[in-house]
Image (cartoon, helix red, strand yellow):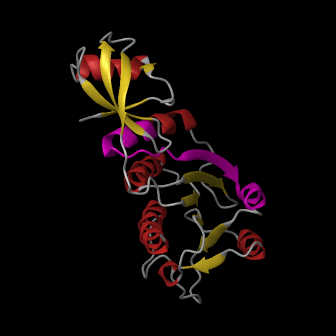
Amino acid sequence: MHYFYHPDLTQDFIELNTEESEHCIRVLRHRNGDSVRLTNGKGTACLANIINDNPKRCSLQISEFIIDELPNHNGLHLAIAPTKNINRMEWLLEKAIEIGIYKLTFLNCEHSERTHINLDRLQRLSIAALKQSQTKWLPDIAISNFSQFIDVNHDTNADKFIAWCDDKNNVQLTDFNRNNQEMILLIGPEGDFSGNEIEMARRENYKEVKLGYRRLRTETAGLYGCFIANILNFQHT
């Protein structure tokens, strides 16, 4: 059974937007009386019956909420510098949602090759990945300068890590345990973080880590972080 997205599931009766309505009625050919699944991207999912199969304004009545004991996300706030090829970041976003991620921030760093991100497009891709993977959590997506990100998260109660290519450091992300529900992982651009950025992170008590034993591409490093956050999260809970 397919998932459809609606941001507000607090009412008994809801109406899908045009895009969701067309997908439900024209593409999947659902009709009045059919039961479908809905998610709000905030951890809630439900069953609903179609009461108006209008392909522009499909209306539904919620019949039952779906109880799932599995965690909605892994508590990871991934802050990563976007690659010059935006397709690689879109791929990472899709896979991160499939695995389960809490927040995703694209960082503008001193060595960044890309500073412009189309958030509207990424939001659409996020909803598509949410429905395809039948998960219930849509991560917050943002853009931030590195220094602003460090300042905003100064008082965050999170386990904080920065991954960079330090040949003298052999400490792995897997060497740590989760102490808090949220985990922040910083991953730099293809030219890595600058010395100034690394010092800023050190002052805010970010732990310096490696992501495995090989040199990873930026999007691979982000995906690796998602996997490890999942493992540490299940150990923590």
Q: Position of residue 101 (x, y in %)?
A: 48, 55
The residue sitting at 61% across, 72% down in the picture is 161
Q: Position of residue 70 (x, y in %)?
A: 38, 57
Asked if the stretch drawn in magenta spans residue 140, the answer is yes
Q: Position of residue 39 (x, y in %)?
A: 41, 36
The residue sitting at 30% across, 18% down in the picture is 50
Q: Which of these two is toward me, 195 or 174?
A: 174
Left or right of residue 114: residue 195: right
Q: How many marks?
A: 0
Asked if the stretch drawn in magenta spans residue 218, the answer is no
Vertical relation: 57 (above or below) 132: above
Quarter of the image where one finds residue 19: top left
Q: Quadrant of the N terminus?
A: top left
The residue sitting at 50% across, 37% down in the picture is 123
Q: Which of these two is toward me, 212 or 101?
A: 101
Q: Position of residue 26 (x, y in %)?
A: 25, 16
Vertical relation: 73 (above or below) 64: below
Vertical relation: 170 (above or below) 103: below
Q: Which residues are magenta?
A: 125-153
Vertical relation: 30 (above or below) 109: above
Left or right of residue 128: residue 89: right
Left or right of residue 206: residue 227: left
